[in-house]
């Protein structure tokens, strides 16, 4: 005997209750930001403490890897004695000058090539070929062109920054939706108005991302260049100290390079936030 259930099928109702993020969004956001800030400070602090402990306990050779406390004390003494600032200023001066030249040239050419197909067809293969050449390999060329002194250093930074800004600018202009351009043409925008009201606001956020990346790379390149063809600067300080087995001074230079790179990159980021208030923030609320 078979029994058949003729009752209507049961319906499953899924109920989702609002969580803390929906009920108290501001409080949740502040707690998440505090957690992120704590992690950002805790991880480097833990590594530094581990390094200090390893040097003190003899787990590593403190002559080769001086303890962070020794590095800090040596850097402080050199700063008070005025021995550190000339090298910092020499590196900063070269980075700022080269960055300004390379960024302006890269933005101008990227904008031109992104807007005009014939210019892009004529120049893109040549620039692509030059882009893959390691920029440090161009230093002998710049030495022949400018001789010894500041010229080769600034030219090397400018060449490095140029390619990052050029690529990001050209790609950003090409990525502007066709509908934006069509809207400008429908309203009878002149070439300047098309640039001012369509291309510039649409492409500038992506351009500034490339400019921020270029800021960090510029510091890396100048450090390597100063090792080869400079009598001062943080790069010269690092490699000269290593040759003299002054490892504590070497690490002081490395720390200064790291701080300089972070500050310069953050300066470019803040400039981008000021210039593009309409763009999404790269450090906004967490979504997870």
Image (spheres, helix red, strand yellow):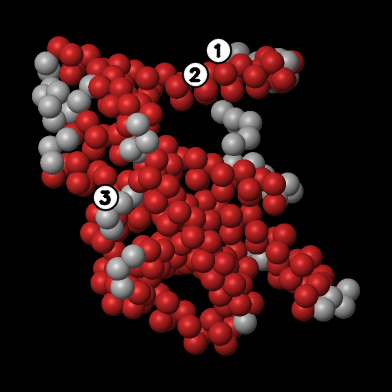
Looking at the image, can residue 167 be seen? no
Residue at position x 45%, y 22% from top? Answer: 41
Q: Quadrant of residue 79?
A: top left
Residue 230, compared with residue 285, is above or below; it is below
Most distant residue in the front direction: 81
Q: Give coordinates of residue 230: x percent, y percent.
A: 28, 58
Q: At numbered mark 3, what does the secondary structure look like: helix, strand or loop?
A: helix
Most distant residue in the right direction: 187
Q: Give coordinates of residue 90: x percent, y percent.
A: 39, 51
Q: Mark 2 or mark 3: name the one nearer the start of the chain.
A: 2
Residue 75, compared with residue 98, is above or below; it is above
Tell which of 71 and 279 is nearer to you.
71
Q: In which quarter of the image is the N terminus?
A: top right
Residue at position x 63%, y 35% from top? Answer: 284
The alpha-carbon separation of the residues under discs 1 and 3 comes to: 96 Å
Q: Nearer the viewer, mark 1 or mark 3?
A: 3
Mark sitting on residue 54: none
The residue tagged 2 is 38
Q: At numbered mark 1, what does the secondary structure look like: helix, strand or loop?
A: loop
Residue 3, compared with residue 122, is above or below; it is above
Relative side of 264 to 186, left or right: left
Give the crowd class for mark 2: few <14, some 14-19, many >=20 residues within 10 Å. Answer: few
Tell which of 45 and 202 is nearer to you.
45
The residue tagged 1 is 1
Mark sitting on residue 236: 3
Residue at position x 60%, y 64% from top? Answer: 172
């Amino acid at each position: 005997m078979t029994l058949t259930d003729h009752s209507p099928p049961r319906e499953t109702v899924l109920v989702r209750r609002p969580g803390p993020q929906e009920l108290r969004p501001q409080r949740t956001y502040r707690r998440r930001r505090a957690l992120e800030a704590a992690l950002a400070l805790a991880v480097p602090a833990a590594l530094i403490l581990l390094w200090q402990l390893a040097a003190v306990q003899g787990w590593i050779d403190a002559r080769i890897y001086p303890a962070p406390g020794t590095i800090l004390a040596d850097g402080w003494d050199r700063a008070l004695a005025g021995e550190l600032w000339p090298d910092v200023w020499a590196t900063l001066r070269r980075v700022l000058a080269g960055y300004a030249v390379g960024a302006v040239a890269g933005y101008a050419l990227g904008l031109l090539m992104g807007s005009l197909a014939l210019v892009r067809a004529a120049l893109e293969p040549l620039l692509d070929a030059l882009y893959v050449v390691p920029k440090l390999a161009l230093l002998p060329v710049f030495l022949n062109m400018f001789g010894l002194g500041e010229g080769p250093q600034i030219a090397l930074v400018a060449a490095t920054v140029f390619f990052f800004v050029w690529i990001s600018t050209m790609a950003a202009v090409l990525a502007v939706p066709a509908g934006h351009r069509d809207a400008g043409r429908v309203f009878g925008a002149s070439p300047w108005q098309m640039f001012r009201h369509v291309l510039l606001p649409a492409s500038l956020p992506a351009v500034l991302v490339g400019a921020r990346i270029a800021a960090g790379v510029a510091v890396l390149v100048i450090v390597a260049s100063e090792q080869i063809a400079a009598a001062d600067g943080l790069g010269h300080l690092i490699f000269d100290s290593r040759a003299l087995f002054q490892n504590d001074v070497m690490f002081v230079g490395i720390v200064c390079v790291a701080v300089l790179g972070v500050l310069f990159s953050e300066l470019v980021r803040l400039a981008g936030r000021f210039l593009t208030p309409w763009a999404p923030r790269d450090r906004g609320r967490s979504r997870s």
